Image (spheres, rainbow, N blue to C red):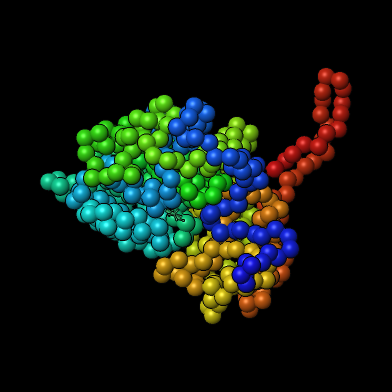
Amino acid sequence: MPKGLCAMPGRPFLQIPGPTNVPERVLRAMDRAVIDHRGPAFAGLTKSVLPPLRKVFGTAEGAVILYPTSGTGAWEASLVNVLSPGERILAFNYGHFSALFAQTARNLGYDVDEVPLRWGQALAPDDVEARLRADSAARPYAAVLVVHNETSTGVMSDVAAIRAAIDRVGHDALLIVDTVSSLASVPFEFDSWGVDVALTGSQKGLMLPPGIGIICAGPRALARAEKGGAPRNFFDWRPILRDNANGFFPYTPATLMLFGLREALTMLVDEEGLDAVYARHHRLASGVRAAVVAWGLDNLCEDPARTSDTLTAIVMPDGIDSDAAIKRARERFDLALGVGLGRIKGRVLRIGHIGALNELEVLATLGGVEMTLVECGVPLTLGSGVAAAQQQFVEKYELRSTNYKVGQQEALVRTS
Ligand code: PLP
């Protein structure tokens, strides 16, 4: 085996903000013979994943479209189906992925106005409103691009408030939202937030390996795709929707991953339940945030109300290179952490807390980060972050008298 690929004892800790850990059950669901994607068994598989995926997006009327691709492919699909080349797009640069989404649109021949924001800021609905009010009446924006959860900074934007801002102006632009690192982990309401196109990848909240890109398209987007859009082939969603009606695809889908997707959706939607999944991510994130405070370090997110529940980006103290710390965590503990991307390379260390994860795994991760940072020269108290997270996780009970029909009894009652 090549050097560096030999396994350390114990399980590796993959705590980057995606790809995330794939549960054993999902791995086992994919570990099977490939089936004929034009046969009747396959049709049932397709039909079994689309309704729960609609629940995950929070849509009754939106259409869900699956592609064998990654999030980058889903970006492209979200644009070429609804926008004609040369159409104007409003985009905001508040992190590595919002910048790349805008760049994708430019590469495809769209006329993109990219508004620079600080990395660490959320996208303020007022900024969207002001830009749309000042828009050209002759050639208005055809779409506004939003990254719901900026994976490079750990900042979440308020999509419902952004929709309200668009509506206050009465602007007709489509609202296209990247949910790559938020969907199936934090609440997302495609219909009630008035989203026109949402896109995601399989490798984060959906607990699958990379390989499926997913789009949800609302009625306005579907109508635009019928009449317009850009020249397209692989990403044209019309043939996919046509064939999906019978459970098939116009070209070869990621067959085995769809078995994994079905298992993951059973776990998230039917067994744990989406509200419990969101509550779990919030609880785990509060633990990580408490640890960062206990260490005396800064969260890159400027507004505590907008911190991400799926990852935390920690600013390194002066003189500490996050790339060196991440290398050390990998070599010492087999702990993979997220690097600082783009212009914050070397300055930020990201802890992913998304996907199949529980309290004990977060505590182990925080223990590894603490030891790594101390070994790299950060003056923090060992155990302080772990203890702060434990304080967030521990449930408090009181012994109380309860008056049941059978008589007075003592019971442990949860108080927090
Ligand atoms: N959008 C966001 C918010 C992301 O975090 C990522 C990747 O991490 C992408 C898009 C690009 O996705 P992919 O790397 O699957 O192409």
Question: Depth check: 299 or 87 in front?
Answer: 87
Q: Is residue 389 visible?
A: no
Q: Is residue 401 above or below residue 340?
A: above
Query: Residue 121's quadrant in the figure?
Result: bottom left
Callout count:
0
Q: Is residue 265 above or below residue 371?
A: above
Please state if 90 lies on the left or on the right of 9 as rendered: left
Quadrant of the picture in which ligand 1 is shown: bottom left
Q: Position of residue 75 (x, y in %)?
A: 36, 49
Q: Position of residue 176 (x, y in %)?
A: 34, 44
Question: Depth check: 365 or 66 in front?
Answer: 66
Please state if 226 lies on the left or on the right of 293 as rendered: left
Q: Residue furthest left?
A: 138
Please state if 304 lies on the left or on the right of 89 as rendered: right
Please state if 172 lies on the left or on the right of 292 as rendered: left
Q: Residue at x 31, y 56 (%)?
A: 104
Quarter the C terminus occupies: top right
Quarter the N terminus occupies: bottom right
Q: Position of residue 171 (x, y in %)?
A: 24, 41
Q: Position of residue 285 (x, y in %)?
A: 59, 53
Q: Residue furthest top?
A: 405
Query: Residue 322's quadrant in the figure?
Result: bottom right
Q: Is residue 206 above or below residue 6?
A: above
Q: Is residue 72 visible?
A: yes
Question: Depth check: 383 or 28 in front?
Answer: 28
Q: Residue at x 40, y 58 (%)?
A: 97
Q: Residue at x 12, y 46 (%)?
A: 138
Q: Residue at x 74, y 39 (%)?
A: 414
